[in-house]
Amino acid sequence: MIEFNPFDDLIVKEPRRPEPAVSGLNEQPLRAVLAHFERLAAGAPPRRVQRAGQALLVTSDQPGFGKSHLIGRLFRALHGRATLIYVRPFQNAALAFQSLLAAVVKELHFPDRADWESWKPEEPTQLDALAHGVLGHLVADLAEKQGDGDPEQVARIRRDPLEAFAQGNRGDAWSDWMRATFEDHRVAYDAAMARRGLSLHSPEWLRVLFAYGYGYPDRMVRQACLDWIAGQSLSAEQAGAIGLRAADVPHAEMSAEDANQTSRERLIDLGQLAAFYRPFVFCFDQTEAYGHAPGLARTFGMVVARLIDEAANHLTLITSNQDPWTTTIKPHFERADAERIAHPPVSLEGLRREQGEELIRLRLAASEAPAEAATEMLGGDWLSARFTTDRDRVGTRQFLQSCKERWEELRHRPVTRTSLPELYEARRVNLLAEPKRLLFDADLLQWLVKTCADGLPDLQIASKGSGYFTTEWSVSERRIVFGFEPGSNWKRWSAIARHAQERAAKQPGLKAVCFRGTEQSAIPGPAWMIGPAIEEAKRRCLQLIVLTRDDFAVLHAGYDLYAEALGGDIPPFTSTDVVAFLRERFAHWWERILAPIESAAEPVPPPDDGSRMKALAAEVRGIVAAQKFLSVEEVIGNLAAAASREEVLQACGYSAEIRVHAHPQMTVLQWQSI
């Protein structure tokens, strides 16, 4: 029988993962947030375009009162009713809207499911549902206006546009009709949108949504649509594939200001289009990070204010500990921006005694602890010592820490504080089962080379908000500049390579570093005429660092640990302690970055169509569902073919029912029915 401490997990790390809820805990704050959402979601789509009202601020008197847990409960309460966007702090004030839009597009391109195979590639995404919602309701509008539509068919379209048009699959009568007639009805669709009060910055939205919704499984077409929605530049070939002219796409050499403005307009347009599908909910968490960067804090206030003033059909929710909010974040806001946030804030509460007892029982039940464990934990006057009166309230994290220590004491084991390496490794292991995190993330990479690297010997770091390369390292007489381009437009990459060579010509020995994820297209593309020139730049001065899912788990684990320290969530460790630890832990990254260009060639991972991982995920799911509770090593021993520990954990990302418990001695997988 595997035994681990049921109270080890003190922090909610992923709000979409199921967590046992204590009756009544922070019920009032949750109801207050839901009440604001209900106004946006009243009635069936298509709804009217309506403004958001003020942003909501959720605060707690001290760390550990359950901000992320509240977001998790909110996400589960709104599942299927809202497009839920969990927003971590941006790192570049000049591209704040681009950062937010990237989070939105990444979420939209994933399926909207809380049950198993939540990462199923062939399942319709939330953007599929939005595209079919917009187009389907416009078709229904035209049929009703012309008076020649079958009322039952119109009702069917309105009830579930995605199902009515067979998810855009070929061979269905309605889907094929849509393909054959879209261009003929395009002007009429635009007029129907105008009658509903929609006024979009770009007139090309319908064409892009049509290309995405009816483009599966053409990956190139779908990716071109995603890049356009994300405000990125497209090549003429990409634009043509989705029915756009070159004039309809952002310029390949657009400035950071133009990119940020385009992203802002896309966000405003998405808010209007949400009237045909679901409202957006933007959850800005870990905002304590802004308290250490006045410029970012000021921009954060501006972003929130612009969302409230300009974006429709959304709810903006902000979480923060009370002290940093009032002393180091809000003071940097413009007064007008601060007024866009409702006052007073929604305040979180601590646990009462009966809630503490319920939390103990829930944790024990979830871990399948022996029946007598609850009697042991609740026996004597231990609980009374933590709640001396009926009115006492205790922070959830503080209470769980006490429970963790009592569990060890009852087993006559020494109570040891978890070390930073152990905290880090637990986060890395859990991240391997979180597929939405293991993708290209410009903010994460900027944090790596700016915040995390700060303090390396002989290193000077300079930042500027715009240009292809926004961060510069000076090490002795060497210069390394960093770019964070997410797109795959050959013209833009040609400009990046040219700019790197021009800078290297002026500063001999300069190296330009750009990052890519394995899920992104290779640079240069196999058919690019400019390919040889980019390869020449790579030989001379341009290094492309390609990150795998394992790499992103490593880096995100470090970032999460840093963010938790900023929020006071892992005492006694401070953010300074964490950065000092990570500077040593990430020695391999500094070596990769500092290597001379002639020895910095990056291996290109082999392409993966996902078939092996899908098969492994199904096998892992079956093993864990049958045995309920076992270690990763036991799962590996039950597999038909060899697989690594990392691959098994990645396979768990397909199944929301598999809970990963990372502990210093072992990693345990548990089946939890949803």
Image (tube, helix red, strand yellow):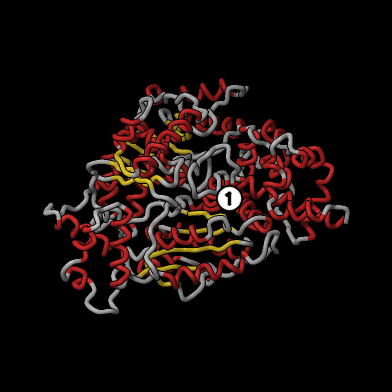
* Residue 582: % across, % down: 29, 43
* Residue 9: % across, % down: 30, 53
The answer to which quarter of the image holds residue 550 is: top left
Q: Residue at x 32, y 41 (%)?
A: 459
Q: Residue at x 45, y 61 (%)?
A: 73
Q: Tag 1, which secondary structure?
A: helix
Q: Amino acid at mark 1?
A: Asn
Q: Is residue 453 left or right of residue 211?
A: left
- Which one is nearer the viewer's eye here, 668 or 320? 668
Q: How many numbered callouts?
A: 1
Residue 545 visible, this angle: no
Q: Is residue 275 left or right of residue 4?
A: right
- Which one is nearer the viewer's eye here, 120 or 481? 120
Q: Residue at x 41, y 52 (%)?
A: 14
Q: Is residue 272 left or right of residue 422?
A: right
* Residue 467: % across, % down: 53, 42
Are there few (<14), some (14-19), or many (20+) residues within 10 Å of tag 1?
A: many
Residue 126 visible, this angle: yes
- Which one is nearer the viewer's eye here, 181 or 467? 181
Q: Is residue 39 left or right of residue 371?
A: right
Give the residue number, with chain letter if any, for mark 1.
Answer: 260
- Which one is nearer the viewer's eye here, 355 or 484? 355
Q: Quadrant of the N terminus?
A: top left
Above or below, comparing residue 31 to residue 638 in the picture: below
Q: Residue at x 41, y 23 (%)?
A: 601
* Residue 165: % across, % down: 72, 44
